[in-house]
Amino acid sequence: MMKMFLLCILLLCTLTSVACAEADIPFIANWGTPVVDADTDSCWSDTPEYDLAAGGSSAKIRILWDDKALYLLAVVTDPTLDESAAAPYMQDSVELFLDERCNRTTYYQQDDMHTRVSFSNYRSVDSGSESRWYTAAKVTDTGYAVECAWEWAVIKPANGHVVGFDVQLNVCRNGQRSAAPCLHDTTGLAYQNTALFGTLELTGRPDAAQTPAYPYALRLAIEKAEARDLTLYVNGSSVDAPLSAAKALAYAPAASQAELDAAFTALSDALNSLDDGSPYTPPEQLLYVAALPDLMTFADGTPVRTAEDWAKRRAEIKGLYEYYMYGYLPDGTGETISYTISDSLLTIHVEKDGKAVQLHVPFLLPEGNAPEGGWPYYVEYSWWGVSDVVKYAVSRGYAGFGYSPYAVASDDSSRTGAFYTLYPYAEHYKTQTGALVAWTWGISKIIDALEMGAGAELNINPVYSLVGGVSRFGKSVAVAGAYEERIKVVIPSCSGAGGLGMLRYSSAGKTYDLTSLGYRNADGSGLWTNGTCESWGNMLAEGAYHWYCGNFRRFTDMYQTPFDQHMLAALTADPERHMIIITGVLSEEWNNVEGQTMAFVGAQPAWDVLGAGDQNNMIVHLSGHAILKSDMELILDYCDKVLYGTEPTRDLSVMKTNVFMEDSNASILLKQLMAK
Ligand SMILES: [Ca+2]
Ligand SMILES: [Ca+2]
Ligand SMILES: [Ca+2]
């Protein structure tokens, strides 16, 4: 009998633990308001403590809440405090995950946050608003402690409220992360999937509870103000008075919430009204515009009717992108460029202001006799050397280059690499060049070297340039098309958000009939539904914001942008140039597949006004986050025709229309653009 009883208990435990994993017994946050200073207040002893341990490090985690915020205390034991890696998640740090509405979606929504703070109080935000994430940190004899506040903005919290929740400890040494234990998630994928979070129940709020005044929003605004170089602004001194008033209040124990809020508004208004001397409105002050900005209408409402008009409109649009989204490409003034060629490597030396950098670009030359003027050439962004697609181009009589952008600008928020060595990233808007443009600078240097003699030595025609890249490199190629007018054939592939995916339109959740691409789903039909697209929030988050200029992070919403990405595509339009946009569909949904078709179609009027309508093209292939060989076959047939007059063996008209433009697939917005 006893045995039977034990067996039942054992079975019950096993069953219960399975059920727990699915139903989530919530973690508990009790009611209380600590002071966020990295010291353990007495109220922390009123709430449960949870343990995290792995890789020789451990943490004791507690959570409190009040009407204004969720609070986290992590007391960490770690013998080797390390922040030598560039990526914040590779530094000793604590991460908080919250799904305020507890939707448990497999992707991040607007209410979801993922933030981090290191032992030295370096804050990073992967999702969510940095203006809601306040932290304090201190190093202790045995490790470090962090105390954090996340200001509620989405929900009105109450007893019994359950939110999605997790905490992760990043255990690091020697620039490497050796472990990342999480309170609930065991997959390490919570950064992209909120369904993996545990849950947290808010409890203990007394009926008549009063939440003390919350000073941390104001303290964050003060930090933001103090980080600015106010001498760069025409009216920099206008911040002085609201900043001093804010500092007097933010640490005053008797300050009321109304006083703190008023000081916050005054300081924020002053910061948002700083005049940097540019002709542009600060991003924070731009109005929300839901409709697509019109490509062929000047900002003052005048229509664009002629090629001359377009040249002016192009300058107007490019100025907006430089200032608000990507930053400025230096014009090369003050650079001294030389090159060396050995075997299959072009090395470009650039000196400026006493600093010197080098770019190493491997290349392959075709066999046989070059056409008059030298070989045309294809440059592909790839950190992995000369790709098979480049080799195919070489077999077709195009010199091939494998351009490695990461040496030019590191793919993280450190703003390092050859470009930033010569052009340090700083606060003035002209020095805020984002990585996509910095990578473009490397392409410019390749063309410079070919023009100044490397082309003659290698028998390459510097004018006949094709430039391609995929994914983040596809974004950079789309930008390069706008910024580097010497690129003759611009080939951005799978560029998505920040590239040629429209900002104001997302194909997420929409169903398309892909029959004409040869697709059949399990039911035998050609219907396919687009999953998640890269979100606006993702573009502004840690891991992506370095692709853009500093001003871009000041937008709160995509509807504030004074452009949309058909306007970026249109900046390539030129009687002497060509655009070939590429995207896949299956597994490419992140890239806003129909949204890229809108950029292609929406740019067409600029090509048409220049009499170059045939030079705007797009390839949609069924599957592959890549420039496929089949794409390159079409592209090179096209280039042979436009560069040398060779009749193509393939039907090039397939690049003027695609599956998303079919009547049953095109959204109303796309149909409107097609009608222009
Ligand atoms: Ca404290
Ligand atoms: Ca959510
Ligand atoms: Ca460590």
Image: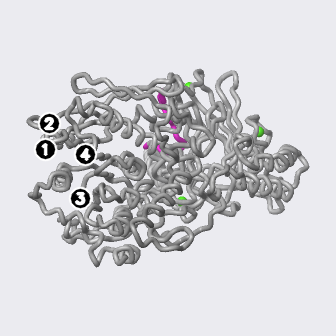
Residue 464's mark?
4
- In the image, the residue with mark 1 has its CB under 8 Å from the nearest atom of ligand 2: no
Residue ID for mark 1: 396
Check contact, mark 4 vs mark 2: CB within 8 A: no
- Separation of marks 4 and 2 at Cα, in angstroms: 15 Å
Residue ID for mark 2: 366
Q: Nearer the viewer, mark 3 or mark 2?
A: 2
User: Element at badge 2?
Assistant: loop
Around disc 1, counting alpha carbons within 10 Å, would you say few (fewer than 14), some (14 to 19), or many (20 or more)?
some
Give the amino acid at mark 2.
Answer: Pro
**Spot occupied by residue 175 in the image (x, y as percentages of width and height):** 50, 25
Q: Nearer the viewer, mark 3 or mark 1?
A: 1
- In the image, the residue with mark 2 has its CB under 8 Å from the nearest atom of ligand 3: no
Give the amino acid at mark 3.
Answer: His
Residue 34 in view of the camera: yes
Between disc 4 and disc 2, whose residue precedes? Answer: 2
Between disc 3 and disc 2, whose residue precedes? Answer: 2
